[in-house]
Image (tube, rainbow, N blue to C red):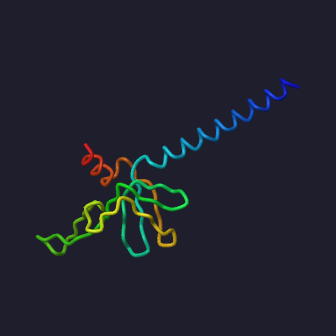
Amino acid sequence: MQTKKNTIIGVVVVIILVVVAGFLHYKSKQSQGYSVVYLTTGEVYIGKLSINRDLMLTDAYIFQVVKDPADQTKNNFQLNPINEALWAPEVLYLNKKNVVFYGPLLATSKIAETLAGQKK
């Protein structure tokens, strides 16, 4: 009787440990690297995306296309940190209905390389 009880307790403990380890692995994967988020408004955000009940973007930048002041026929690209904006939020909570697509940036992308260079 005691052995059966110990076996059940052991199985329950192993299941709990596997679930906790899986959750921690999932959370650590979410916070690695940068993701791009494209909204229905045409705005493009870059940041560390967490997908829980809400879409949450931290360490965020807005990606903007601006005219080259020297040659108005050419475009330049800017990454402006959200925390330097007038409204300067710590976190952006995104409405899932307004997200067209999102995905992780490759570490070799120009934007990821630029952000990695700024962090050093």
Question: Image check: 115 left or right of 4?
Answer: left
Q: Residue at x 75, y 33 (%)?
A: 11
Q: Residue at x 60, y 40 (%)?
A: 20
- Residue 74 x/y as whole percent: 20, 71
Instruction: Give the answer, above or below, for where 21 lies relative to 61.
Output: above
Residue at the extreme left of the image, as rendered: 70
Instruction: Give the answer, above or below, for where 67 lies relative to 14.
Output: below
Q: Residue at x 41, y 56 (%)?
A: 35
Question: Image check: 22 left or right of 72?
Answer: right
- Residue 85 x/y as whole percent: 26, 65
Question: Image check: 98 left or right of 13?
Answer: left
Instruction: Give the answer, above or below, for where 1 lies relative to 74.
Output: above
Q: Nearer the viewer, residue 73 or 12?
A: 12
Where residue 93 sits, quadrant-wise, is bottom left
Q: Nearer the viewer, residue 109 or 87?
A: 87
Q: Nearer the viewer, residue 2 or 92?
A: 2
